Image (cartoon, coloured by chain):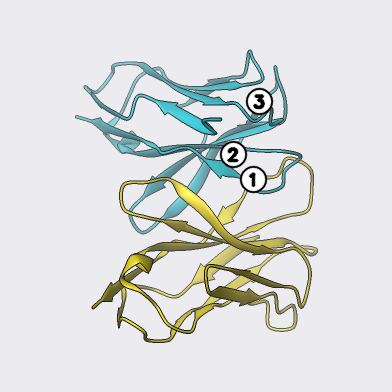
Chain colours: A yellow, B cyan
Amino acid sequence: GNSVTQMEGPVTLSEEAFLTINCTYTATGYPSLFWYVQYPGEGLQLLLKATKADDKGSNKGFEATYRKETTSFHLEKGSVQVSDSAVYFCALRLNQAGTALIFGKGTTLSVSS
Amino acid sequence: NAGVTQTPKFRVLKTGQSMTLLCAQDMNHEYMYWYRQDPGMGLRLIHYSVGEGTTAKGEVPDGYNVSRLKKQNFLLGLESAAPSQTSVYFCASSDRGETQYFGPGTRLLVL
């Protein structure tokens, strides 16, 4: 079936460290891929997305590249800040009208100063 | 433009009680979704709607019902609450199935 697997957390980093959160997927066809972020006590916000192979999504210093050959969409940031502390969800959506998102289990990131 | 709003923010129920969670969006989106979020499980789809008057089951629909009488509203009902329904519930909406916009969530505790 269709699924998303992301690395277990929590991930604990010091400010200005490099961040990678791994995400791989299994899907029929060619899904769109997303990273959502959830700050404490809030709902999910779209961080970035990519809709086809080799696309790179980017936002707020975060990047992820849609790799069809490795079925991956790893999230990276060159220098994290304390304000990046949150839960990060990788998700896919099959390209059929109205289909919902399929989420990974989430990765908690904690950044200390 | 409030986006997606959810009512209530927090509720405590006793086993067997009923309640309705309300989701409203002001973006004129066709598609609306209800998810539940449980620790270590990510978000799982309960029900969704592709337009006014339509609803469909998601991954975990048992124990829930939904209605979409108006395009801007999507209601989630629990007829007889169970402790297993203790969770955080998120509503989302999207236009033609593209980027989904989420509400702030409703925390439900069933005792």
Q: Element type at marker 2?
A: loop
For this orientation, the residue located farthest to the top is: B69
- Labels 1 & 2 near each other (Cβ < 8 A): yes
Residue B62 appears in the rendering: no
**Are labels 3 and 2 assigned to the same chain?**
yes
Q: Please tell me which residue lies in front, A112 or B9.
A: A112
Residue depicted at 50% across the width and 51% down the height:
A45
Q: Element type at marker 3?
A: loop
Residue depicted at 70% across the width and 44% down the height:
A99
Q: Please tell me which residue lies in front, B10 or A17.
A: A17
Q: Which residue in the protein does label 1 denote?
A: A100
| Amino acid marked by disc 2 | Gly
Residue depicted at 57% across the width and 65% down the height:
A4
Q: Element type at marker 1?
A: loop
User: Which mark, by number, is residue A31?
Assistant: none
Q: Which residue in the protein does label 3 denote?
A: B55
Q: Residues within 10 Å of mark 3 (few under 14, many from 20)?
A: some
Residue depicted at 70% across the width and 22% down the height:
B54
Chain of the residue that carries numbered disc 2 in the rendered image: B
Left or right of residue A91: residue B85: left
Q: Which residue in the protein does label 2 denote?
A: B58
Q: Quadrant of the N terminus of chain A?
A: bottom right
Distance in Å between CA atoms under marks 3 and 2: 10 Å
Q: Up-down: is A80 above or below B19?
A: below
Q: Quadrant of residue B104?
A: top left
